[in-house]
Image (spheres, rainbow, N blue to C red):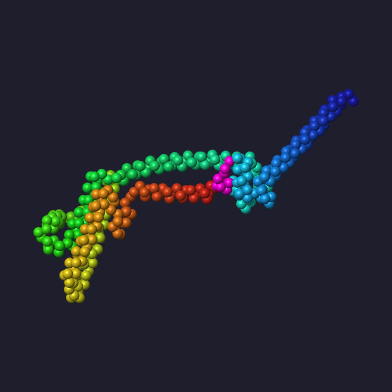
Amino acid sequence: ADTTKEPAVVADVDVEKLKAMAQKYRAEAAALEAERAQEVAEATERAFAKFDQNSDGVITMSELKQGLETQLQTDLSQERVEALMRKFDDSGDGKLQLEEFAGVEKFKVALAEMARDEKKRSSELLAVAQREEEAYNQISEILNDRPPTNTDKALSLLPYLFPLLDSLPYANSLLVNHPDNPAAQLLAAAYFAYQSVPLSGFLAFLSLSFLSGVPRINRLVRYNMLQAMYLDVALFVPGVFALLVGGASQLTGQAIPVELVASTNTALFATTLAAILYSSISSVAGQEPDKIPFVSKIVKDRMPSVEMFKDWLDEQKSSMDDNDKNGNGLK
């Protein structure tokens, strides 16, 4: 009977030995791990002490910057150091405590990640800039913002015939008093021809309104079309005022002096003629005549341009950058 039990006893002894050996190995591994952790902790404390120059138990932004530059033998931008502080400062107090101190190697890894991200961002911005430049060129072609040719300059003068002819009634006294003047005769003939066409003013207004929106036409020509239209609209205001004053004069029985009417009309015609001459001279020089008070600002605001598109894109990019800073910044 004792002989049959010997193998079982031997097996039990072997199992116990194996368990003892496994426990011994686990204990040795735990001891090694604890020793390694102690070494890492001591190394971290030594590294922390090198950064903590005033030994106050925390690493400030300036201490982090100076310590990393000394350890890595390179200059770091303030932006990168601030990003590192945000990444590792778990308490959010703007300083690193010992338990937050990651060590130089982890700082190097974080800086490498930042460099890759910045390189990627730079490549993306370059690609965006190239696409924008292509878009600007295409829009410039569509809007025909190129410098005007001599033909464009000549065509840009024609729209001002519209306000010039509509302002001639205010020059009646000048034309009547100088019947032998060739210029007066020419203006009178042009005015009568203009008036002989039914709805000539309305048709001229519609034509300029339509053509000013055709992008194939050079910008200077389109600009002058709009400006001529608004100069003509401006002539409508004193005409309405004159009707109101005339009606009030009839109701009150008070006659308006002829000299006052003549001088006012002459002043209106002279003002319109000055605006037309200024616009014509500027256009011949290839410059937009954008210095007429009130009128030019309205025209400029209504003229689509590449600059408007650039401003809109800049606003979109600024908004996107703000969103990136607020939502995607490093902790």
Q: Is residue 80 magenta?
A: yes
Among the 4 quarters of the image, the one containing residue 110: top right
Nearest the camera: 10 or 141?
141
Nearest the camera: 182 or 17?
182
Residue sitting at 22 percent across and 63 percent down?
A: 268
Q: Is residue 17 left or right of residue 250?
A: right
Where does residue 285 sit, x and y in percent of width and height?
A: 26, 49
In this rendering, is residue 236 above or below 72?
A: below
Residue sitting at 26 percent across and 44 percent down?
A: 149
Among the 4 quarters of the image, the one containing residue 293: bottom left
Nearest the camera: 243 or 2?
243
- Magenta stretch? 74-83
Nearest the camera: 13 or 1?
13
Residue sitting at 80 percent across and 32 percent down?
A: 21
| Image quarter (top left, top right, bottom left or bottom right) of the N terminus | top right
Q: Is residue 137 left or right of residue 150?
A: right
